Amino acid sequence: MTTTTLTPDVLIIGGGPAGLTAAAALAPRIRGEVLVLDREKDAGGIPRHSDHTGYGLRDLHRVMTGPKYARHLVEQATSAGATIRTETMVTHWAGDRAVEVTGPQGRLRVEAKAVVLATGARERPRAARRIPGDRPQGVYTTGQLQNAVHLHHSEVGSRAVIVGGELVSWSAAVTLREAGCATELMVSQYPRTESYAAFNVAGRALLRVPVANRSRVTRIIGKGRVEAVEIENLDTHARRTVACDTVVFTGDWIPDHELVRSGGLDLDPGTLGPLTDTALRTSRPGVFAAGNLLHPVDTADVAAIDGLHVADQVEAWLTGAGEPAPGLRILAEAPLRWVSPGLLRPGDPAPPRGRLLLWTDRSIRFPHVIVRQNGRVVSERTLPWPAAPGRVFRVPWSVMKGLSARGGPVTIALR
Amino acid sequence: MTDTTPHEPDPVYDVVVIGAGIVGSAIARDLSGHQLSVALVEARDDVGDGTSKANTAILHTGFDAKPGTLESGLVKRGYHLLSEYARSTGIPVEHTGAILVAWNAEELAVLPGLKEKAEQNGYDRCRIVGADEVYELIPSLGEGALGGLTVPDESIICTWTTNLALATDARQRGAEVLLNHAVTAVSVNTRSTTLTTTGGSVQARWVVNAAGLGADRIDRLFGHERFTVTPRRGELFVFDKLARPLVDKIVLPVPTSRGKGVLISPTIYGNVMLGPTSEDLTDRTATGTSEDGFAFLLDKGERLMPRLLAEEVTASYAGLRAAIDHGDYLIEPTPSQRYLLVGGIRSTGLTSGMAIAEHVHEVLEEAGLVLTARTDLPGPPQMANIGEATVRPYQDAERIAADPEYGKVVCFCERVTAGEIRDAFQSPLPARNLEGLRRRTRAMNGRCQGFFCGAAVNRLLNENGCGGAAAAPARPEVNS
């Protein structure tokens, strides 16, 4: 049996905010087809099942709920002329810019001139966090919980423990409340939750969620259904059990990087996404990446703006842009865990929104950013917004001014 | 007034096999190939839901068995029987080969003796190799290996499909599979034996006890005091499929006076496994994982293959092995009770199960059961392929063209299609809950543990009358 081959100009893998926005921007500007493949039943990505408002602020300049935002992005890409195929999953690479695909229409081969990876990120589930104990039912990630509650209208329990102190942890609390499940406790490894920004202060007041700071879950207890979790204070090592019937593991994101790894593309050891430059090129010519695959995770609108940014770069590639110049690595120093993008090439544009995206493990109210090259301080600046764990810390690209193209790797530190 | 309503007397099965694990299912399959009525009685709500689901899933050559034991002979014979059966039913098998790695002088000194033992067991393809060759075979191994012993025919197999194939085969040959029938009392009468179970009473002429972890308790119900099963907990980690290129062979520890170490093995599903621990317990339901177990495994893993630990953990399992205070399989008939004990079947039972069944029918025949082979047997069942060694439905263009449900991937991480999930609910021994579905299809066994597909899988369970199964990260258990 012969396999059907599709030959779009641009193949976008992943129909979330980044992929759909890139498709909408590219479709009117290029002659050939822009094909978006999404493995879910409906395109739209994570916002589909994130049924609260706040979406669209930075890209559309108005706010709406997640599902509405998802539908808007699908509509925008479709009316721009892009093709979206859902329930269609890329399974293997079949060449530098060619892939094998499975969908209800059959086994397809797609050969494109340019590929954009926009596969997003997911939360580490319990197993990946290596948390021992029983194996009862009632253990979720936020993604699974929101999928169950908002898309499948399933019931969850009545008393939950939320594991994690990230922005998404509060989103889980909102979903639980809508599902009629009380949050007994939020367990966070960080010392303060107040530092997480306004959302959390407001959220805490609104949701009245008790928080155990500087704590971790050490065991899940329960036969059949969750009965309790054991938690430990990271400083005193004191342990106690908290009764609950539902546990939600939130945050602790990892990019969905299977195609990056199986294709042998260079990996950024910090983000675990593909290593890209500010033009969002990966190490393979003609293969680009955008969205939370690169920075696990920033908000949906920031991912969408990546899509706008990558569209320009894809268009330049299709019209025969030359070889990019050799790049300098951009590296993050503790307490910064990663920085995205991780490469800087002379002559390239500034990154999306003119921001470097970073992740901090420590909360700093007035962060002082120091950029060094070969140990020499190139620039430093105190920023008026905090660096807080659990959400992306954004730094203006202008801190990179004054670097030498031949000067060796660049490091970014915080004080 | 007398009740004259005629009522059917309970059927008296010629043979009732207690326990629908690998061994019990293989025995029921073999016996139902004869002119006998057979029932396979299982305490749980699915076949293969006890110790058999919890296996390191190695198809053993039997190279390291104790020569001259019943186990040694049956493992050797079982290797061939099961390899052949796997070919005819589609049970996934991968011939990876194994290597025992010596990390110190004591372990190195043990290797020639192991090679000799393998030869005594009739296996002459082991080879002692130097450190250079060890690293050629497993480049990602940690530093410090001194040498090794290769076992080219050790293989990996899908333990879930094996169990399901044997039980399905038994059923298609006419055996009755009675789930949710936990035996609570036994009454041996002159012509038949009555088993009182949680699912009602069952009458049998002959009873075969293949109850695994519960075999000693059943044996006591027959009035014997022969042995005690000690639940031995084994915990292990399953690493992400992206780690699979690191491990192409089964990496075995060298058994020494200081005990058995842990192994690293590719899995038939394309992952890498590290484990198991070994811990004697008293609680036969203690299938949880532990902090100590995890710490032990991580410490071992750090030395065996540091690069493996940089990969994500997809699942952690714990399971109970049925360890007994006896150096060999315990297969003993009591003809006066028309009763046969099949106890002490350790992890090798996956490999030897079909040979045990052959042996059991010989023992029963000697003890007086008349066995006449049937000539009207149906062919072996054709099992769904959930292994990575051959083409899976999502890769099969023709199959998708014939039925687009095989083109709808529901579980992305494991690439399980809607067609396969539908089939699992419609098979002769259908999935009855999430665990059963996972063992039949791999749905939700992958790295996201339900982040993407959990809710969809849960809905399919509900639609197929398996409600109440919340999409929790439940997982199969393990033994070794």
Image: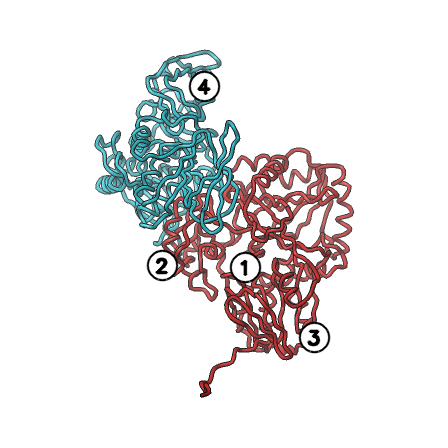
Chain colours: A cyan, B red
Dot 1 alpha-carbon crowd within 10 angstroms: few under 14, some 14 to 19, many 20 or more: many
Earlier residue among tags 3 and 2: 3
Cα–Cα gap, marks 4 and 1: 55 Å
Report which residue position mark 1 lands on: B48
Sequence order check: which comes first, mark 2 or mark 1? Answer: 1
Tell me the CA gap for discs 4 and 3: 82 Å
From the image, tell me which residue sits under label 2: B463
- Indicate whether A224 appears above or below B174: above
| Quarter of the picture holding the N terminus of chain A | bottom left
Badge 4 crowding class, 10 Å Cα cut-off, few under 14, some 14 to 19, many 20 or more, is many
Whether marks 3 and 2 lie on the same chain: yes
Question: Who's the residue at 35% across and 20% down the image?
Answer: A397
Direction from residue B246 to residue A129 in the image, left or right = left
Respond whether the residues carrying marks 2 and 1 are from the same subunit.
yes
- The image quadrant of residue B364 is bottom right
Give left or right: position of B359 versus A141: right
Compare residues B392 and A365 and report the one nearer the observer: A365
Q: Chain of mark 3?
A: B
In the rendered image, residue B254, in percent from the top left (x then y), is placed at 70, 44
- Residue A411 badge: 4
